[in-house]
Image (cartoon, rainbow, N blue to C red):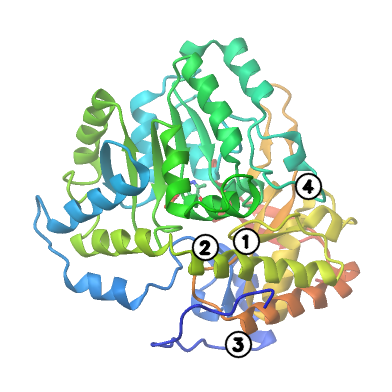
């Protein structure tokens, strides 16, 4: 079989409500054409995110029952700590309730105004956390990442020359850490190669700058290395992860992705002084160091999830289910980022709707249409999320890529659901000439895509 069938069977089912086209029409209007403002029970297939949407296994649910809710020293923390140390290899393991809290703790400890943090491409919460401290979040992914048609095995790679230039131009003293996001979410869920990580690590060590991974999808990245990078075919994903993390000095992690849980995260670092400062801050904003904003049972579910995510039957299915959706769309002539990434298929909205300029949010137009027609929720990763006004010139700067992400929750939807999605996208692609652009009616100062309200620019939408 080209695409492996589900390596699990269903023990509990969750019925999904269906809605009529008229109901969806009024719901999306009420939501200001922003799918973040829709009630989730009005959605048939929710591809908004793969974050916190995983189905837990029977083993993880059983783990919840052995939750030890002691304020200090819960046995689940010690289990969590030992699992994370075994996989990631770092010395200090600091639990948080989400990935962005790990980012907040790290950046509020190490950043000063005018500091610079390079990454392949910063994820939106990472960028926002950095800019909140008046520091600069610089992207230095390889140029190939911006060519959505180019087949390249590791489009998440960092351009080493760009990175070197940033270090030399800014001065290493202004760069408290270098980050690598695995897989590169904002660039299409594309993996980073071991060779590239090794090179970044050498450069970082030369200038004495710590290398920190944004490790949300580390297992998916490691599976791609096993599939695509010479020399790794006979290594286990766990061994690959151990090598990968050995090139860095720590990581931020949202367990809501490759932790296979609905809430949780952590920060892991080797540096004792840094860990001490961060732990003090943790107590202030999250909780005591052995629970960090989570219940003991949640820590247990994460520990079990991190072990399960390294199961290669699971990863083979996972990566191929996403690829299956991508290949069906390619066969229908729909422009998507190639090759297909790990957790999502990304539609190239500029090519899908060439008649709508970026100032009118072509990605959002596709998202709205998918919901309206088929009850599917996707998300725009383009000008609504990333365009900003340049403080000096007053001009709006648009992101190079204008994407619609169809993120696949882990172990949640069957291959038949995935086929339904492919057919729905194909249908709106056939009628794309009738889709119009959108205008913003309300926006917040940062992370505006979460709360913005929009309206269609002309009547026939
Ligand atoms: C989800 C995500 C985060 C933030 O994690 P939360 O748990 O949502 O706070 C950071 N970086 C990347 C790459 C992510 O995908």
Q: In the rendering, which numbered label is found on residue 244?
A: none
Sequence-wise, the earlier of marks 3 and 1 is 3
- Depicted 231 relative to depicted 347: above or below: above
Sequence-wise, the earlier of marks 2 and 1 is 2
Query: Residue at coordinates 48% horizontally, 54% vertically from top-left?
Result: 219
> Does the closest atom of ligand 1 sit within 8 Å of the Cβ of label 4?
no
Q: Quadrant of residue 352?
A: bottom right
Residue 232: x %, y % from top left: 56, 48
Of the two numbered discs 3 and 1 in the rendering, the one whose residue sits closer to the viewer? 1
Taking the image as drawn, is residue 25 in sight?
no
Of the two numbered discs 4 and 2 in the rendering, the one whose residue sits closer to the viewer? 2
Sequence-wise, the earlier of marks 3 and 2 is 3
Q: Residues within 10 Å of mark 1 (few under 14, many from 20)?
A: many
Dot 3 falls on a residue whose secondary structure is loop
Q: Which residue is mark 4?
A: 359
Q: Nearer the viewer, residue 457 or 362?
A: 362
Q: Which residue is mark 3?
A: 19
The Cα atoms of the two marked residues, 3 and 4, are separated by 31 Å
| Mark 2–mark 1 CB contact (< 8 Å) | yes
Residue 109: x %, y % from top left: 33, 27
The Cα atoms of the two marked residues, 3 and 1, are separated by 25 Å
Dot 4 falls on a residue whose secondary structure is helix
Residue 320: x %, y % from top left: 63, 68
Of the two numbered discs 4 and 1 in the rendering, the one whose residue sits closer to the viewer? 1
Sequence-wise, the earlier of marks 3 and 4 is 3
Query: Residue at coordinates 44% horizontally, 64% vertically from top-left?
Result: 311
> Does the closest atom of ligand 1 sit within 8 Å of the Cβ of label 2?
no
The Cα atoms of the two marked residues, 4 and 1, are separated by 25 Å
Q: Which residue is mark 1?
A: 344
Q: Which residue is mark 2?
A: 50
Query: Residue at coordinates 42% horizontally, 52% vertically from top-left?
Result: 238
């Amino acid at each position: 079989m080209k695409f492996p069938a589900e390596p699990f069977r269903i023990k509990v089912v969750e019925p999904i409500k269906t809605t009529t086209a008229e109901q969806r029409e009024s719901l999306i209007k009420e939501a200001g054409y922003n799918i973040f403002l829709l009630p989730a029970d009005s959605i048939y297939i929710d591809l908004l995110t793969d974050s916190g949407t995983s189905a837990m296994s029977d083993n993880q649910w059983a783990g919840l029952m052995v939750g030890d809710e002691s304020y200090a020293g819960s046995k689940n923390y010690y289990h969590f700590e030992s699992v994370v140390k075994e996989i990631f290899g770092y010395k200090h393991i600091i639990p948080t309730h989400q990935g962005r809290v790990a980012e907040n703790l790290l950046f509020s400890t190490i950043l000063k105004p005018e500091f610079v943090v390079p990454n392949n491409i910063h994820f939106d919460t990472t960028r926002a956390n950095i800019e909140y401290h008046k520091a600069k979040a610089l992207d230095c992914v390889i140029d190939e990442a911006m060519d959505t048609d180019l087949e390249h095995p590791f489009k998440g790679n960092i351009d080493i020359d760009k990175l070197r230039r940033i270090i030399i131009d800014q001065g290493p003293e202004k760069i408290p850490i270098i980050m690598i996001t695995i897989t590169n979410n904002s660039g299409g869920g594309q993996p980073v190669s071991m060779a590239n990580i090794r090179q970044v690590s050498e450069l970082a060590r030369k200038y004495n700058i710590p290398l920190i991974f944004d490790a949300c999808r580390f297992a998916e990245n490691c599976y791609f290395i096993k599939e695509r990078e010479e020399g790794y075919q006979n290594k286990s994903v766990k061994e690959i992860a151990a090598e990968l993390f050995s090139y860095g000095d720590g990581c931020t992690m949202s367990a809501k992705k490759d932790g296979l849980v609905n809430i949780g995260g952590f920060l892991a670092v080797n540096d004792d002084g840094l860990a001490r400062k961060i732990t003090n801050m943790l107590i202030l904003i999250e909780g005591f160091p052995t629970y960090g904003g989570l219940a003991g049972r949640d820590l247990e579910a994460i520990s079990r999830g991190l072990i399960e995510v390294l199961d290669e039957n699971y990863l083979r299915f996972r990566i191929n289910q996403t690829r299956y959706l991508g290949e069906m769309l390619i066969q229908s002539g729909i422009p998507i980022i190639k090759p297909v990434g790990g957790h999502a298929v990304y539609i190239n909205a500029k090519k899908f709707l060439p008649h709508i300029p970026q100032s009118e949010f072509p990605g959002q137009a596709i998202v709205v249409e998918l919901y309206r027609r088929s009850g599917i929720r996707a998300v725009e990763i383009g000008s609504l999320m990333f365009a900003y006004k340049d403080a000096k010139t007053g001009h709006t700067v648009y992101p190079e890529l204008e994407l619609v992400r169809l993120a696949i929750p882990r172990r949640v939807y069957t291959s038949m659901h995935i086929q339904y999605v492919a057919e729905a996208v194909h249908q709106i692609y056939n009628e794309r000439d009738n889709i119009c652009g959108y205008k913003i009616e309300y926006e917040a100062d940062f992370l505006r895509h979460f709360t913005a309200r929009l309206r269609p620019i002309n009547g026939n939408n």
